[in-house]
Image (spheres, grey):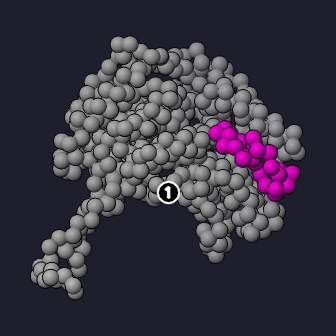
Amino acid sequence: MDFDTMLRPGDYYDAAFHTPEHPDGELEIRSPADTRVVCAVHPYARAALEAAIAGARRAWPSWRRLSIDARAELLRRYQARLREHRSAIALTISREVGKPQWEALTEVDAMIAKVDLTLGEGRRFTDTENLPDLPGEIRHRPLGVVAVIGPFNFPGHLPNGQIVPALLLGNCVVHKASERTPSAAVWMARCFDEAGFPAGVVNVVQGPGEHGQVLASHSEIDGVLFTGSSAVGRRILAAQTDRLDRLVALELGGKNASVALDDCDVERTARAITFSAYVTAGQRCTASSRLIVTAAVAGPLIDRIVQLARGLKVGYPLNPASPVFMGPVISDAARQRLIAAQRAARNHGFQALLPGGELSAGHPGHYVSPGLHLAPSAVALVPEYTEAELFGPDLAVYIVDDIDAAMVVANRGWSGLTASVFTASRERFERAVDALRVGVLQWNRASAGASSRLPFGGIRESGNHRAAAIHAGLACSYPLGLQLPAAKEAALTWPGFE
């Protein structure tokens, strides 16, 4: 399909695409891989947001009463449309995010697989449960109209992972796409439209970040599913003080640690950590931004990571004849924040094993080199570097004496999303399970590789205990306890009750 068709307006509601008659502004999306390229232009208006919410509210009574099997069949049709448009959706993601094409294709494949997971294993957490020793049932009911507010780094996979279970459980959805990467949502809307979803059930709206805040606090929204930064997550929670009935599920950022103990497999550990630190140019909430390594293995492990990082192909992501591992970061502002943080680290004694910095890739884009900085001590603190989620390709290395010291350093700070532990010992890994305060823990695996068959979500400031992935259905429904008549009714009498 001709990519130029994506220049059409991005608002979708009442089962049709709409151009705002009186736009409040316009999103002009330039590719971070080549800033000369305008990927899409999306006018936006607050009126479109209101129209989408109103349409969803009208559609909800009929949609929630449709059988779950009928809803599942429509999701199968949506899955078929995703599969049909797989290459074009991946191209859109690659252009707007700057991902290499191989990685963009894996994102679309994850979207396709999410339907199977939701209709299969995922249903067991929200299916009706009959209690054999009690005349009763546990059912899960839809919230109503839910807002899905998506991030730029996975503009298809992450919203899709919340939209699909929300729809299966009988909710209507208003999806506000990231203002940085809005066009994957347009493709999703097209796929829902081609699948024949009723008007108002699925809606996509475009606009600046402020529109997301409006959506998250709107009186007609019953649930908010947000993926993004901890700072924005806090603002969304703060907006709920007068709405105790609104369910909010936050999937937030991380300052994730990879812990390498002295009995780890150096080669496999180095490869997994290098992947986790630099894939997607470090723009994953699950990226490893800290390596905590025991002294006995620090030398060979660090040397191997440096060697691997130097060998990574970084450059223009849209040339299939010369595939790269890593493309640009999302914007020049993101690039400058990263460079400033790395500079601050060096000014405070961090040793630049790989300094990072701007990179020329033959195209005018936001390219940077992988960075690797060795801390002067295990307690080194540079707030803008050691505490901030940099969302760029950089790894800070801390050398510690033993597993106990490693656990202390890994738990330091605000993050509680994910961690990796590299050790040959199950006993040591179980010590880490007990000690680490995270929502996802990997054993001898990359931190940036969570399985959708497991719960995914963070604690502390990385989430609010509403896990996504296999548990996503629990964040867009509520449990209903049904107590039914007993086979033999007891007499309704009590002491003092005549």
Q: Nearer the viewer, residue 315 or 19?
A: 19
The percent position of residue 296, horizontal first and vertical second, equals 81, 65
**Residue extent of the magenta highlight:** 375-398
Q: Nearer the viewer, residue 167 or 498?
A: 498
Residue 122, placed above or below residue 219: below
Mark 1 surroundings: few (<14), some (14-19) or many (≥20) residues within 10 A: some
Q: Is residue 327 magenta?
A: no
Left or right, 433 with reference to 482? right
Report the residue that reaches farthest toward the left: 488
Q: Is mark 1 on a helix, strand or loop?
A: loop
Q: Residue at x 59, y 59 (%)?
A: 438
Quadrant of image for the C terminus: bottom left
Report the residue that reaches farthest toward the top: 22
The percent position of residue 491, horizontal first and vertical second, equals 13, 83
**Which residue is labeled 1 in the image?**
465
- Which quarter of the picture shows residue 326? top right
Left or right, 173 with reference to 339? left
Residue 81, placed above or below residue 262: above
Quadrant of image for the N terminus: top left
Q: Which residue is drawn at 80% across and 45% down?
A: 382
Q: Is residue 387 magenta?
A: yes
- Residue 113 can be seen in this image: no
Report the residue that reaches farthest toward the bottom: 495
Q: Which residue is drawn at 36% across and 30% down?
A: 204
Q: Which of 437 and 343 is in front in this view?
A: 437
Question: Disc 1 residue type?
Answer: His
Q: Which residue is drawn at 66% across and 25% down?
A: 332
The percent position of residue 451, horizontal first and vertical second, equals 48, 55
Left or right, 353 with reference to 444? right
Residue 186, placed above or below residue 489: above
Q: Nearer the viewer, residue 15 or 368?
A: 15
